[in-house]
Image: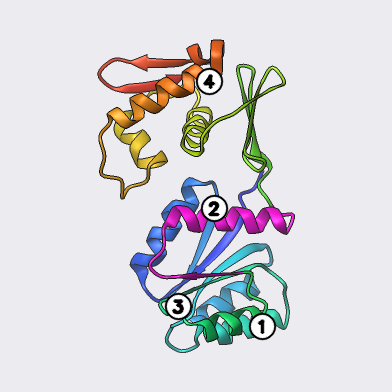
Amino acid sequence: MDKMKIMVVDDESRMRKLVKDFLQRNNYEVLEAGDGSEALDIFFEQKDIALIILDVMMPKMDGWQVCREIRNYSKVPIIMLTARGDEKDELQGFELGVDEYISKPFSPKILVARVEAILRRTGKAQADEVLEVGGIRLDKAAHMVEIDGKSVDLSYKEFELLTYFMENCGIALSREKILNNVWNYDYFGDARTIDTHVKKLRSKLGEKGELIKTIWGMGYKLEA
């Protein structure tokens, strides 16, 4: 299946790269624009953009102008980014048909979660929302895990950990890699956190917990 296209519009290249990296890790294709006029050029060239992440403060043409222009032609979902947490800005955004409004600084993982929620709401969610490995069925959208048809109750982090294992089935994952991907890059913790969560996850998965293998001195691997 073709990856869904998301356009990230921000005059700060570091911000664009940060958002792009997180979106690409979640299997989206990312188009970049450094200002409003470039964003409009790309938007009218590419007919299949699924969502736009749009910064408010930009040279040449600000985010509000870009939003107005796009809304004349399209109802594509738009997430506005702003450095100001101003209520007037927020109200203006919703009046223009903005779907979501996020103030900087923000967590990239939260931004990706908002992107996925909006795409689900607008019926454009990814087809790979359901993962199945070795009798374990995980539904990302419903946040549900079932083993042989029976529901398993997992905490938020256990669910994320299992998702990461299932998406990388058969691949040896170091503790550092798991920390970076499940606990995020800004987590300064102890690798033992992972061991504790893996132990709880195995316990909750019952017999299926044996599918999570320990790789001594390195990390873990899910084997079906």
What label does residue 85 carry, if any? 3
- Counting from the top left corner in percent of width and height, residue 19 is at 43, 59
Q: CA distance from mark 1 to mark 4?
A: 46 Å
- For label 2, count other residues whose C-alpha is less than 10 Å away and answer few (under 14), some (14-19) or many (20+): some
Q: Residue at x 61, y 73 (%)?
A: 43
Q: Residue at x 72, y 83 (%)?
A: 72
Is disc 1 placed on a helix, strand or loop?
A: helix
| Residue under pointer 1 | 95
Range of magenta residues: 100-124
Q: Amino acid at mark 3?
A: Gly
Q: Are marks 4 and 3 in contact (CB under 8 Å)?
A: no
Foreground of the two, 38 or 218:
218
Q: CA distance from mark 1 to mark 2?
A: 23 Å
Image height of 100 relative to 123, above or below: below
If you read the primary sequence from the N terminus, does the residue marked by circle 3 or circle 2 appear first?
3
Q: Residue at x 54, y 76 (%)?
A: 39
Q: Is residue 95 magenta?
A: no
| Residue under pointer 4 | 204
Q: CA distance from mark 2 to mark 4?
A: 25 Å
Q: Nearer the viewer, mark 1 or mark 4?
A: 4
> In the drawing, does residue 47 fall left or right of residue 86?
right
If you read the primary sequence from the N terminus, does the residue marked by circle 2 or circle 4 appear first?
2
